Structure formats: structure tokens, C-alpha cells
Amino acid sequence: MAKEQFVAVRKNSEGDLQEFQTASGQTLSYQDALQLVQAGNVENVSAFKGKDGGTYIRSNPDGDKSNNLDSLPTF
């Protein structure tokens, strides 16, 4: 199975990521996106455990800020 890519994001009023749009046109809730990431099915992102104990999605560091999740277009 080919890996998905996140191409756009939806944020709440505080700027927190809420939903993700994939290259194949799916719109995923944060929880559904996190499950895909944890299963290894999304390119260029990974899951990490925050200081608060929650699990979050982040871009893999590659020195290119243009492909960071916060830099993706919104929908």
C-alpha cells in the first residue's frame, strides 16, 4: 500500500491542528490521522509523546520548514 501524505490542515482558533487533508482527498480527524501515522502509513511525519503524556503528530525534521505541518495550506 502506498503511503499517504498530508497536503492541508484545519486548525482551531488557538492554532492547534484539528483535521488533515490527504493527497488522496480524505479529510481525517486528528485521532484518525494519528492512527494512520502510528501505523506507519503517512510519509514525512511521526508520532511523539508530549510532556503532558499525550501523543501528537509532527513533521519529521529535515531542515525544510516549507513542508512542516504548520506550513501546509489550510482548508
Image (cartoon, grey):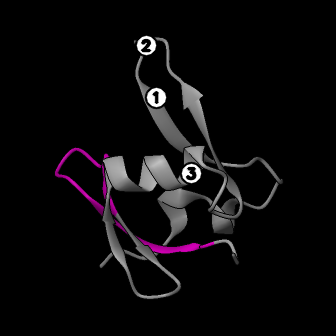
Residue 73 located within the stretch drawn in magenta: no
Residue that lies at the very extreme toward the right in this rendered image: 62
Q: Nearer the viewer, residue 1 or 15?
A: 1
Q: Where does residue 10 sit, x and y in percent of width and height?
A: 29, 65
Bounds of the magenta segment: 4-19
Along the horizontal axis of the image, is 7 left or right of 15?
right
| Amino acid type at mark 2 | Gly
Q: Amino acid at mark 3?
A: Val
- Name the residue: 69% across, 64% down: 43
- Measured as percent of width and height from the top left, residue 19 is found at 31, 61
Secondary structure at badge 3 equals helix
Indicate yes or no whether the magenta region holds residue 16: yes
Residue that label 3 marks? 37
Secondary element at tag 1: strand
Q: Is residue 61 left or right of residue 9?
A: right
Helix, strand or loop at label 2? It is: loop
Residue drawn at (56%, 51%), measured in percent from left and top?
Answer: 37
Instruction: Count numbered badges in the picture.
Output: 3
Q: Residues within 10 Å of mark 2 (few under 14, many from 20)?
A: few
The one of 28 and 64 positioned closer to us in this rendering: 28
Q: Residue at x 41, y 87 (%)?
A: 25
Classify 10 Å Cα crowding around label 3: few (below 14), some (14-19), many (20 and above).
many
In the depicted structure, whether residue 11 falls above or below residue 35: below
Q: Which residue is mark 2?
A: 53
* Residue for badge 1: 55
The residue type indicated by label 1 comes to Thr
Q: Are marks 2 and 1 in contact (CB under 8 Å)?
A: no
- Residue at image location 42% in from the left, 56% down from the top: 33
Of marks 3 and 2, the one in the foreground: 3
Q: Nearer the viewer, residue 48 or 35?
A: 35
